[in-house]
Amino acid sequence: MKITDLQLQQYGIYHDASWQPSQTSLNIVMGENESGKTTMLRFIRDMLFGYGRGKWQGRKGNMGFIRSDGQTYRVYRNEKEQWFENANHVKFTEDLPAAWWHGLNRSIYEKIFAVGLEDLQGANFLANDRVRSRFFMLQGGDKLAAAKAELEEEKAKLFSGSPQGKRKINQLAADLEEAEKELDSLSNQEKEFSDLQRRQEEMKKQASALKQQLDRDNEENDRLEKRLGAWKYYQQAVSVKHQLDLSSQVTMFPSNGKEQWNQLMNRMKVIHDQKESLQEKLDAYKPVKKEEIIPWMGVENELEKLYVDLGQWRQTLSDAENMEKEKADWRMDFVNLGYSLPLWDRPLSLDKPCASVDWEEGRRLAGSLGVRNNELHFWEQREPEVEKLSDDLALPKQEESESDWQKIESMAAELEQVLHEEADIQSEIDDISGREDKKYTPWLWMSLVLLLAAAAGIAAFYTARAGVAAMYGSSGAAVLAILSYLLHSHVVHKKGNTLEKLASRKDELEASRQKISEKFPGQAPKTVDELKAFHNLMQEKRSGFYKDQAKRQAISWKKETIRKQEQQHKNWEEEGSILTEKRDKAEKAWNNWLSENSLPRTGAENLSALQEQWQKIYSAEGKGKIMDLRLEQIDAKLDAFAERAQSIIAATKLPYAVNPDSIADIYEENHRRSLEWEALQEKNNQHAAYEKEMAKLDEGWASCQREMDTLLNLVHARNAEEFAEKVNAHEHHDQIAKEWERVKQDLRMYAGGEEEFETLWHALETGQYDQWMEKHNELSRKVEEETKELGELQRSQGAIDNEIFRLAGDDSMTAALQKKEKIEAELQSALEEWLTLMYTEELLTRAQSIYESGRQPEIMKMANEFLKDMTMGKYALHISDNGKDIYIEDSMHGVKTEKIWSSGTGDQVYLAIRLAMALSFGEHIEPLPIVLDDIFVRFDEKRQRETLRFLMDLGKKQQIFLFTCHERTMHIAEEVGYEKGTGEFIHLSAGQIEQVGQ
């Protein structure tokens, strides 16, 4: 079965989506997380087996498929409704697995046909009894497994191996043990009572059995006595009854019947005498057929034609012999041809034909090798020069670095700035200190005037000489007076404030100078006068530092130059390695080409000479092929002659060899036997006339026989003696009837009644008198002995009954014994039931093993082929004799057990087994689609490519769906598909199905 169309109308994230998967190539489906890959996997299984319980809500879809017989169908699953239709739209409601797949369920399908990463962790899927039985036996295996499971369940209900088991047999055994302990605890009286009871039961059984036997013997003896008494009457009755039976069989007999019978006997005697005389003549000569004289009569025409062609046959044999000699000479010349060719210089082999050589490829490889040699030559000429570093270029230890010197320069500049600023502040202090102090300023006088004006305005307001305006004017004058006084105070105290600020700034600068001087390496200046000497010192240090830096820079540049030269030389060496590798690769390709074409090892520059010498070998070999062709034509003619001759010789059944002389001898023998046949043909004609006369006599004899049968049938007789006896009885019928009634009446009176008479008569018919008498005497003796033995038993039984009655006061022993007997009966019944179940289970296990062993070799052989294809022949799969252990063998015959396999190798092994089981099911029942989900997680790229190549080839005949969430796996699959020219590639994205080109 192959899926042709998937219609996801409403299923998960898919809405009105469709896909027509390929039937003849591998289907690779790539989808990232949340893309609908798992939903698509579940949809395929739901279409095959239906929705799970309670999982049908809101799910609608259908699937088209084609069966192996070419019939197309479509299955519909619309929530709870499900059916499938054929091409004529005939609707079916059966379940697909039950209708076609012998009850294959979803669980077993997922264990075999649906393979995920977790399914490649070992062969534990075969531990499932139903799975193993289903696929090793293919049909009916699940029934055996189910039957075994039911038996095990029933056994478990009856018995448990655990000491604490509470099953039926365990409980009965415990009860029996308790009952036995109870009996053991009783006294000797109870043991004696038990023995008496047992003896009483035994005597009762013996007495009962003996009494029954005595009654049977008496009854049998009475019957024998009656039979013996009636035996004399019975013998008379048998004789009379026989005569009466014969008479009753003759119902209609003619009056002249005896005369007819006598005439018929005379005629038959005459015919018999004539037949005996004629038979002597027939026996005197036995006719001979032409086939006996000439056994090969069917091939006479072919013999005639081959006899005509004998000259051509002999000439063909001569031509074959000459051609063989010529071919032998050619072989010698061809072998020695190799010594005449300088590049070969060895004998040529006749077993290795001169294969066709692709000289264009050889010229390409030779040219490539020449180019690589030239590149390597020019590379050697371009070796760069590397200077050596002298000892005087060694750098001394650097006392101050660039950053240290920059710090010194910065501190010197700061010192110089601090000293200059300190000198300027001292100069400004001196200048301000030399100025005169001011006590009165214009601002003081202005504030006093404004204060007086404010006092006058207030006085005018209070004396009512002015209005509110005078008040506002006095307020403004007061404010201006205050401002003027503040300005006066600032001017008066400005000198002191300025000197105070300058002194503070001078102290800060002194502290900063002290701090810098402590860090400065060397004598730091303290005044501006010392700056000139400080400048000279700094200039000398600066000059020395930059000279050292220049020297160091020159040495660094020299080292850098040498480093670049060394790097160039290293690059040159790497280039040489690459060119050497390319040259070796080209040389290897050239040598491989020579080896593949069975050509001698030589340089690429000798290609033209190699081709010319090969052409000579090829021409010589062509001459040998022409000879072989001519020999084949001659052999074909000889085979045709030999086949014709062989058919003729086989027809003659004579020990002739297959050659022209034999055919000539057979031809002469055929001519001689033809003359012999003409002489025998006249005798055959005379014998035929005798046979015709014998046939007429046989016809007359048959006529008489028919007349005799008519007379015999009238009296129902089988032969002549019975005929005479019945005719005689018919004539005395009335007398015999009276005699029969008399004898029968005597026997009836002896028996006593009609029913007893019938029984006695039947017994007399089936018995023998001597045996009855012997048995009667034996029974008489036996009855006497049994009567005596029964009396003894009854006396002993009475004594035991009295003793039991005496001990019957205490009934504890009786109750214990009854309890034990009941438990033993129940335990025996349960054990018999448990043993029946155990033997039945063993029979089912053996039957299952026989069926499984019949399928196992075929599946493992297929799995072995799959593993070889997946590993490029690196590994072969084997199974142990007991069928439980799996191991692999590499190309060097090294055996690897399951414990030391790599994860990727193990995945390939179990994938091969799963695929083999799935295909085996398809071969015997029906192929089903195989679903592989992310099986390449532990595969490297090489193993992925090898497995994908195998799956691409397998997908051409078996429909396979390969799902993956890895984009790299999809790229590898596309590359392999492009290489193989096959494969369908699908991309899933948020409920969308997109086909991707190769």
Image (tube, rainbow, N blue to C red):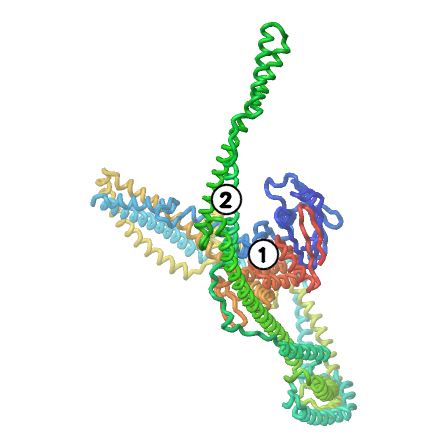
**How far, Cα to Cα, is label 1 from label 2?**
86 Å
Residue 855 or residue 597, whichever sits in front? 597
Circle 2 residue: 422
Q: Residue at x 59, y 75 (%)?
A: 385
Which amino acid type is marked by label 1? Ile
| Horizontal side of residue 938 vs 278, given as left or right | left
Question: Which residue is located at x 50 percent, y 44 percent?
Answer: 422
Q: Closer to the camera, 281 or 510?
A: 510
Answer with the quarter of the image where residue 258 lies.
bottom right
Say which element carries label 2: helix
Does residue 477 appear to the left or right of 747 in the view shown?
A: right
Mark 1 or 2, closer to the camera:
2
Asked whether residue 631 is in view, the answer is no
Which one is in front, 623 or 589? Answer: 589
Of the pair 208 and 72, the residue shown nearer to us: 72
| Residue type, numbered disc 2 | Glu
Q: Residue at x 59, y 41 (%)?
A: 53
Image x and y of residue 351, in percent: 64, 85
Q: Position of residue 738 (x, y in %)?
A: 54, 54
Q: Quadrant of the N terminus?
A: bottom right
Q: How many marks?
A: 2
Question: From this viewpoint, is residue 56 visible?
Answer: yes
Q: Which residue is mark 1?
A: 935
Q: What's the mark number on residue 537?
A: none
Q: Is residue 844 above or below residue 389?
A: above
Q: Residue 575 in the image: x percent, y percent?
A: 62, 72
Examine the rendered structure and indicate whether residue 473 appears above or below residue 730. Answer: above
Count neighbours of disc 1 (C-alpha within 10 A) and say few if under 14, some if 14 to 19, many if 20 or more.
many
- Looking at the image, is 761 positioned above or below residue 390? above
Q: Quadrant of residue 578?
A: bottom right
Sequence-first disc among 1 and 2? 2
